[in-house]
Amino acid sequence: MFVKDISKEELKQLYDKDFPLWAEINLQLLKEKAYELVDWENLLEEIEDMAKSDLKACISYLAIILEHLYKIDNFKHLAGGELAGNKWRKSVLTSRNNILSILEHYPSLKNKLPEELNTAWIYAKGYLKNWLIENDYNPEDFNIPAQCPYTYQEAMERKL
C-alpha cells in the first residue's frame, strides 16, 4: 500500500489497530510533505505524551524517594531496624541518581520537577499504605500526612 492511498479515516483507525504501522505511515507522509493526509490529532497527542514521559519517570523516582525517606523517619522499627533502613537509603540514592541523569539529558525538566512534589507525594502515600497492608498493619492506625512532609530540596539532598 502506498501511503498516499490511505484515507485520513483509515489512518485514524490504524492508530488503535496497528500503532507501529500508523507511526510508519505518518512518518512517510511527513517525509513526503503530504501534510494534509497526516493524522495530526493523534500525532500531536503522541508528541505531547513523549514530552511528558521523562517527567513522569522523574515523578516516579521522586515518589520512591519520598516513600523511603518517610519509612526511614517513621517505620524502621516496624521493618527490622537498621537493615531495612539501609535498603531504603540505597533506594533513595539510586532514585536520586536516576533523576539527576534524566535532568542532565533534559535540563528543561529541572524547573518542572519541583512543582510535581505533591503529585509524587500522592503516589508515595499509596506505596506507604500498600506496604503497611502487605505487612499486616492497618494504614488508618498511622498518621500519614496529607501534605508532603519534605521539600524538594530535602528529598534530593538530605543526608542519609
Image (cartoon, rainbow, N blue to C red):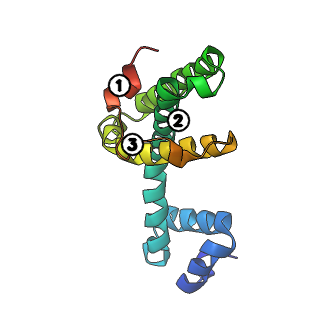
Front in this rendered view, residue 117 or 50? 117
Badge 2 amino acid: Ile
Dot 3 alpha-carbon crowd within 10 angstroms: few under 14, some 14 to 19, many 20 or more: few
Mark 3: secondary structure: loop
The Cα atoms of the two marked residues, 1 and 2, are separated by 14 Å
Q: Residue at x 32, y 37 (%)?
A: 114
Residue 78 at x, y = what percent?
61, 28
- Do the CB atoms of the residues marked 3 and 1 lie less than 8 Å apart? no
Front in this rendered view, residue 61 or 107? 61
The Cα atoms of the two marked residues, 3 and 1, are separated by 16 Å
Mark toward the start of the polypeptide (2 vs 3): 2
Would residue 34 be seen by someone viewing this image from the given angle? no
Tell me where residue 79 sits by quadrant: top right
Where residue 64 is drawn, which disc sits there?
Answer: 2
Badge 3 amino acid: Pro
Dot 1 alpha-carbon crowd within 10 angstroms: few under 14, some 14 to 19, many 20 or more: few
- For discs 2 and 3, the disc positioned in front in the rendered view: 3
Residue tagged 3? 145
The Cα atoms of the two marked residues, 2 and 3, are separated by 16 Å
Front in this rendered view, residue 142 or 100? 142
User: Viewed as shown, does residue 38 lie left or right of 81?
Assistant: left
Q: Note whether 10 is above or below 123 in the view shown.
A: below
Residue tagged 1? 154
